[in-house]
């Protein structure tokens, strides 16, 4: 049975920091963000309404000031009452604009927060659906960067882009109409300067985006190094590699600094350029307006004032669009990575709906081939059969493929060729979840979750009673250790179980597996981190646990598997010997050599 080439594995490389260049990809990302945003239509309506009022009030102010100048100031007699009333109206409008601006910003920030929450939720849910090989190919630091930095970038962009974009469109259209209504001659002056403004703005934004893109990439690299250093801090200190790690971090941090500096240089040019254009426009409008008034009597002072204000309302929104374009591109770059993660193929796609129910425990590997990477076969033609209730030990040098066999049995990876059967039926005919419910694995490297000790033991069986938990703990030889803790079973577990020794974590993990009562038990170096006395107790408990239960034991301490019903010796991905302890010792092959080397009985 062919399963297709294996992809992924520990030797893979991270591939999720590519940046979207094709416009159709950018549009696709924008549509995906909009698909989240449109879930809040009432909020979008009120935001748009508030922005519309703000824009209309803004556009009305130059008209009001023009009326004051032309009709009440630039005349022989001044109507102070009318001026006071108009100034009062201006103050009221300004206050209303401030309140409306505050309201729409708060409302938009609220919506952006909800959208970021929704995207973060979907991304985390998808992480639970992804196969193990995804985590082999992608570093944890970079995955964390996607769920934090990239989603935060989307939030920041949304909080600013939507209101600024809507406001800019309304102001640009409104300013053009108002200018044409006020003076078409002066409007031409503004429009003639527009190509220069657009050229400068597009040039700056295109350059800035390139460096913002590099900035995001380097930020992910820095995050990866920080997490790697934190997780491996003991190893770093053990080998006195603090200086090397600092140098590695400084190098990546310097690259981030360069990218950030370059992005800042170009993005920082925007406001000075806009102010320069503002001043040029102001000078041109005043000069041309003055000529039109003095020579041709074609415009009034109030109209000149109004045009200068409308011109600023026209140019500045264009610059705002350019600036939010940078934000938009950053959001697209972040969204591209986030949605790539969300769209990554789930390991449960096309998974069978058939439930694996009662299991007697017969396991068979039939001509199994597997490799983590194409053309790099790790297991080659693996054939063996384990009868129900038997214990099978797998031994061999490090890297020979022992743990890979267990990974395939639990379908953490799927094989390239061959078949794996339980009770004579292919495991690929059943759902992965139901299969994993029948398999209990105790790994050499264990992990405890935040919560209490009780919660960690009940992790695989949340509805277990306290009595059942205690019985499992006793069987795992960890009950007495827990009873000595300050709060016993309610003692809090810190991140990853760092407040427990490796051996204690392993014992709690064994108790967790015992409580789940699996039909097939796997012990992958389960006693490697405990002392000899505790190991002897655990071996006795394991002897009771594996009774009438199909069990796989991976061990380097060959003394612990002497009583196994069947022993497989793996070498370079192949089974080179098989039999019980006595048979293999009499054969004087690889197993006998390993055993004699361990116990100093070389003959």
Image (cartoon, rainbow, N blue to C red):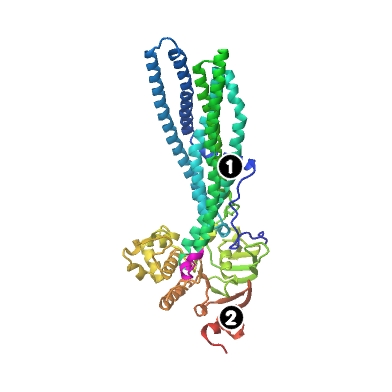
Q: Position of residue 99 (x, y in %)?
A: 40, 29
Residue 142 in view, yes or no: no
Q: Which residues are magenta?
A: 235-244
Q: Residue 601 placed where, x, y %? A: 54, 87
The quarter of the picture where the N terminus appears is bottom right
Say which quadrant the C terminus sits in.
Answer: bottom right
Task: Give the farthest residue toward the left.
Answer: 486
Q: Which residue in the structure is indicated by mark 2?
A: 591
Secondary structure at badge 2 equals helix
Q: Residue furthest top?
A: 76
Decide whether residue 240 is among the magenta residues. yes
Residue 128 drawn at (x, y percent): 51, 54
User: In the rendered structure, does residue 88 fall within the stretch colored magenta?
Assistant: no
Q: Which mark is residue 601?
A: none
- Which element carries disc 1, helix, strand or loop? helix
Counting residues from the N terminus, which is met first, the one under dot 2 or under dot 1?
1
| Rendered image: mark on residue 29 | 1
Q: Is 275 located above or below residue 502 in the figure?
A: above
**Camera-side residue: 156 or 517?**
156
Residue sitting at 44 percent across and 16 percent down? 68
Task: Tell me how far mark 2 sits from mark 1, CA to CA.
Answer: 57 Å
């Amino acid at each position: 049975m062919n399963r297709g080439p294996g992809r992924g594995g520990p030797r893979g490389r991270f591939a999720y920091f590519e940046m979207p260049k094709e416009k159709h990809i950018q549009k696709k990302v924008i549509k995906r963000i909009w698909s989240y945003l449109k879930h809040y239509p009432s909020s979008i309506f009120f935001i748009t309404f508030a922005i519309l009022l703000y824009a209309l009030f803004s556009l009305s102010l130059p008209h009001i000031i023009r009326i004051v100048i032309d009709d009440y100031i630039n005349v022989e007699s001044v109507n102070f009452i009318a001026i006071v009333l108009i100034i009062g109206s201006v103050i009221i409008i300004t206050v209303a604009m401030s309140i409306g601006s505050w309201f729409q910003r708060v409302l938009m920030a609220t919506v952006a927060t909800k959208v970021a929450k929704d995207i973060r939720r979907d991304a985390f849910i998808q992480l639970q659906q992804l196969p193990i090989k995804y985590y082999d190919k992608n570093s944890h630091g970079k995955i964390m960067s996607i769920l934090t930095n990239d989603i935060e970038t989307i939030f920041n962009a949304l909080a600013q882009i939507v209101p600024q974009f809507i406001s800019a469109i309304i102001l640009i259209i409104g300013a053009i109409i108002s200018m044409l209504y006020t003076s078409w001659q002066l409007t031409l002056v503004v429009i003639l300067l527009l190509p220069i403004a657009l050229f400068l703005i597009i040039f700056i934004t295109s350059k800035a985006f390139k460096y913002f893109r590099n900035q995001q990439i380097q930020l992910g690299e820095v995050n990866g190094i920080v997490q790697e250093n934190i997780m491996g801090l003991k190893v770093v200190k053990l080998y006195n590699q603090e200086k090397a790690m600092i140098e590695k971090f400084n190098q990546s941090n310097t690259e981030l600094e360069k990218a950030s500096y370059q992005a800042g240089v170009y993005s920082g040019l925007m406001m000075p350029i806009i102010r320069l254009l503002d001043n040029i426009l102001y000078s041109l409008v005043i000069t041309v307006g003055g000529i039109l008034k003095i020579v041709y009597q074609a415009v009034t002072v109030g109209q000149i004032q109004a045009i200068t204000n409308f011109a600023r309302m026209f140019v500045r929104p264009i610059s705002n669009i350019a600036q939010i374009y940078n934000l938009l591109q950053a959001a697209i770059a972040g969204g591209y990575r986030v949605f790539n993660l969300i769209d990554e193929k789930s390991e449960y796609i096309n998974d069978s709906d058939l439930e694996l129910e009662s299991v007697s425990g017969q396991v068979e590997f039939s001509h199994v081939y597997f490799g983590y990477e194409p053309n790099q076969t790790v297991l080659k033609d693996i054939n063996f059969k384990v009868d129900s209730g038997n214990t099978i030990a797998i031994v061999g040098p490090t890297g020979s493929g022992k743990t890979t066999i267990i990974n395939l049995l639990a379908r953490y990876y799927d094989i390239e060729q061959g078949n794996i059967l339980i009770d004579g039926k292919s495991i690929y005919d059943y759902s992965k979840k139901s299969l994993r419910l029948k398999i209990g694995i105790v790994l050499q490297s264990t992990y405890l979750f935040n919560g209490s000790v009780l919660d960690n033991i009940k992790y695989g069986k949340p509805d277990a009673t306290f009595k059942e938990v205690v019985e499992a703990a006793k069987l795992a030889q960890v009950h007495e250790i827990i009873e000595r803790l300050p709060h016993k079973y309610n003692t809090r577990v810190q991140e990853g179980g760092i407040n427990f020794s490796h051996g204690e974590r392993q014992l709690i993990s064994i108790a967790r597996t015992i409580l789940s009562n699996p039909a097939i038990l796997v012990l992958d170096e389960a006693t490697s981190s405990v002392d000899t006395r505790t190991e002897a107790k655990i071996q006795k408990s394991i002897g009771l646990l594996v009774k009438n239960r199909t069990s796989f034991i991976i061990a380097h301490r060959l003394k612990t598997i002497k009583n196994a019903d069947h022993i497989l010796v793996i070498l370079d991905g192949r089974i080179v010997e098989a039999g019980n302890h006595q048979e293999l010792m009499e054969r004087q092959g690889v197993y006998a050599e390993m055993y004699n080397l361990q116990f100093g009985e070389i003959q």
